[in-house]
Image: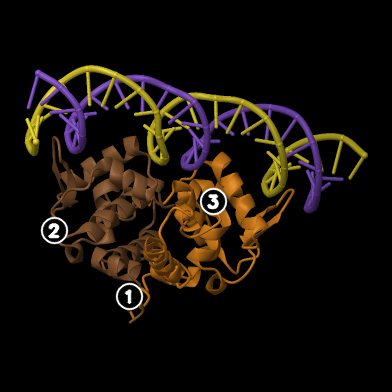
Chain colours: A orange, B brown, C yellow, D purple
Amino acid sequence: MKASVKSDYACRAVEALALHHPNVRPLRIDDIAQREAIPANYLVQILIELKSNGLIQSRRGKAGGYVLAKSPKEITVGDVLRAVQGDVLEMPMLTESRCPDEIKRAWRRIKVAAEGVADTITFEDICADANGRPQMYYI
Amino acid sequence: MKASVKSDYACRAVEALALHHPNVRPLRIDDIAQREAIPANYLVQILIELKSNGLIQSRRGKAGGYVLAKSPKEITVGDVLRAVQGDVLEMPMLTESRCPDEIKRAWRRIKVAAEGVADTITFEDICADANGRPQMYYI
DNA sequence: TGGCAACTTGAGTAAGATACTAAAGATTAT
DNA sequence: ATAATCTTTAGTATCTTACTCAAGTTGCCA
């Protein structure tokens, strides 16, 4: 199992927008790209996916750009991962009949654990952490 | 994040050997391949990796094959994943300086959660599950 | 209303990973 | 000896990743 660069870029882009929230002035692609050191032409595609999944909004034309579609506390890392790659943790073997049920259950437990944590971390948490107020991660 | 077919094959192969344990007669590659519906020529490479990581043992020549190197309760899914892919959950962004610390911490939480579960599931658990004695997964 | 600045869309692509196949070599029981 | 087995290395078709690029659309503003 391996996390992709793309999902990292997506999280960093949403973080940039979350840190900018609730400022109404939209952030331009190039601003996000430069601030987060992400190739602008690649970021374009990621932002489109985040938008089509309702996580961010865009404004076209001059003075255009992106803002969050909802508050940072309503967006989780899990939401971002599902937006850019369909699932937090893809497990093709779960739909393969040749994989025994007991092995599937083991895979599913790992998947549930990862999703559970990803769905727990909001971008409010991440912004607080960025500002030196670490969250109570291990309750 | 996506789990590979290879890691699934590896778990299924170890399960086959665990179900055979503690029988001393080794299982042949072709036996495991046929029972688990894994391409034999691919399984060869996986078994070598499992062996070089000390999870299984081999005997060459006639009447050769594979057996577990230790008891099923001493082998976890995490051990198998580390053997065939180096880590339970690879996260290249954790070593990239461009990734902000607060995002890294979020990734690390997901990684720790997945590893924690993977290291909890032993092949004794899986064999018990296969034999209709489901484990207490959610304590 | 013309033009520029921004997002949008779709096509293309180099490099690497994945999931195999194949073959020659080494070892051991009989 | 020889057959059966593991071992090792090489090769490869397909897919995915992580991009680049260019033409199109929209909206603000002078």
Labels 2, 1: front one: 1
The residue identified by callout 3 is A32
Q: CA distance from mark 2 to mark 1?
A: 22 Å
Q: Chain of mark 2?
A: B
Labels 3, 2: front one: 2
Question: Which circle marks residue B70 in the picture?
Answer: 2
Disc 1 packing (10 Å; few <14; some 14–19; many ≥20): few
Asked if badges 1 and 3 are on one and the same chain, I answer no
The reply, left or right, for residue B110 in relation to residue B21 is right
Q: Earlier in the sequence, mark 2 or mark 1?
A: 2
Quadrant of res B58: top left
Quadrant of res C16: top left
Q: Nearer the viewer, residue A25 or B10?
A: B10
Q: Chain of mark 3?
A: A
The residue identified by callout 1 is B133
Labels 1, 3: front one: 1
The amino acid type, in three-letter code, at marker 1 is Arg
From this viewpoint, is residue B9 visible?
yes
Identity of the residue drawn at 51% across and 54% down: A10
Q: Position of residue B53 (x, y in %)?
A: 17, 48
Asked if badges 3 and 2 are on one and the same chain, I answer no
Q: Position of residue A87 (x, y in %)?
A: 52, 58
Q: Position of residue B118 (x, y in %)?
A: 30, 63
Residue A41 vertical placement versus B27 (above, below): above
The amino acid type, in three-letter code, at marker 3 is Ile
